[in-house]
Amino acid sequence: MENFDVAIVGGGLAGLTASIYLAKAGRKVIVLEKSSRFGGRGMTINKNGICMNLGAHALYRGGAAFLTFNELGMNLPGGIPSTKAHGIWKRDIFTIPTDFRSILSTPLLSWSAKVQFLRLMIRLGNLNVGEIQKMSLTTWTENEIKDPMVRNIFYALCRTTTYTFAPTIQLASSVLKQIQLSIKEGVFYVDGGWETIITKLRDIANHVGVQFLAKKHVLEIEHYEDKQRIYCFDDEVFEVGTVIVTTPPKEACNIIKGAEGTSLHRWSEQSVPVTVAALDIGLRRLPNPTHQFALGLDQPIFFTNQSRAVKLSDDGSIAVSLIKYQNPALEMKHTHEDKEQLESTMDLLHPNWKREVVAQQYLPTIKVVYDFPHINRVETPGPNIPEMPGVYVAGDWAGHDEILADAAVASGKRAALHILKQSESEAVHHGNGAVI
């Protein structure tokens, strides 16, 4: 049996990122992925020649993922979409103010509200989010924004930038940081969908010697003092010094023997998964080219034409995405109504769109993240499980102040660097008889 220094369970963004940093430092790494494809929710599906992500995806240009990809030398093809946006209010469509001229001209806001909105935008740009006390987004918003319509627009921007609709528990400082990132840096769409990112990460990983096994479903991980034994469903067993588990937290608890008495159990118990209903549509043409990007102001919905910035088909077909944000604090009922609401939104924005359809997919409750910074978090998860030396976690739920893909990539890198630092400390200890 071939020996490895580190095994990584899960071949999504977190696992791939961690594998590269470890292999570049000389560690022998294997990635075990239970699916036939790598990438997790970063995979892209080709439907009738149109590249569809699992719901709308965007990289934040100043975020941890984008910066890490640059650090790894990844040259991602793609583009920066226009920020011109429309808002949907009471089944009518309005321009959302994004600059001084549109603030003055929008009929959505009274004159006093326009002044308040302008001041809010200036304040958000200069706000030190690190000084904000621990409070919910609702508490911060109700205290700081008095005009109801300004509040509606702000909440819509918060949903869009975090892909999360949980204002009563979302940590205000985390959301405001993401808003700042969106305002200052904007987002980046990727040609060919996020499969392009996964392919480039795998290419780098292969180049530095990472080994991959697909359809390798991990059944259990046993922790010992200086080694971890990994049992797979096909009876293959791996024994390594270090393991990084990038599965969702509850799954990690299930496969790591003895997890119920560790920090991992607390992290799992405090986690709040986020879901959306996602409708992705391939169109021969966009019926109304004016409506490229729209936010619901009185309902938690979102529309984007991703093809306005990137190439997602070979024949010029257009890929659009609609999202209905599902509040994790509320019990989900009648998810079939979400699809009807999204289709009704398309009817409003793009009449007769069904005549142009060449492909579509509907995901009624696709996971966005398995946790995010919220007021009920007792502690930030990972990267190491203190009670189990050599066992690490990473994933979108293991972010510290990052969220979404930024959390996945940052946690993967964080786990890898922690492992390398730990190895250096042990080398010093064994070499000199003391830890310096």
Image (cartoon, rainbow, N blue to C red):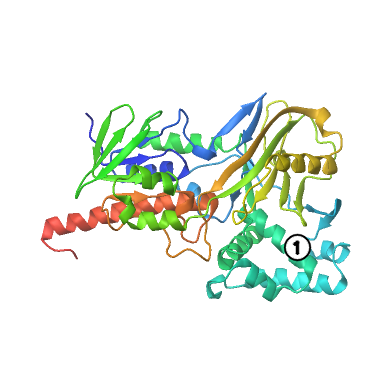
Instruction: Give percent across and percent down for residue 209.
Output: 33, 35
Quadrant of the rendered image containing residue 265: bottom left
Q: Nearer the viewer, residue 226 or 44?
A: 226
Q: Residue at x 47, y 52 (%)?
A: 397
User: What residue sits right under mark 1 in the picture?
Assistant: 152
Q: Nearer the viewer, residue 317 or 70?
A: 317
379 sits to left or right of 157: left
Q: Is residue 223 above or below residue 125?
A: above
Quadrant where the C terminus is found in the figure: bottom left
Instruction: Give percent across and percent down for residue 248.
Output: 45, 46
Q: Nearer the viewer, residue 197 or 371?
A: 371
Instruction: Give percent across and percent down for residue 382.
Output: 38, 56
Label 1: state its secondary structure. Answer: helix
Q: Is residue 148 above or below residue 222?
A: below
426 sits to left or right of 137: left
Q: Amino acid at mark 1?
A: Asn
Q: Residue at x 73, y 45 (%)?
A: 303
Q: Residue at x 38, y 46 (%)?
A: 252
120 sits to left or right of 44: right
Quadrant of the rendered image containing residue 280: top right
Q: Nearer the viewer, residue 374 or 52?
A: 374
Q: Residue at x 26, y 35 (%)?
A: 238
Q: Is residue 254 above or below residue 423?
A: above
Disc 1 residue crowd, few under 14, some 14–19, many 20+, Cα 10 Å: some
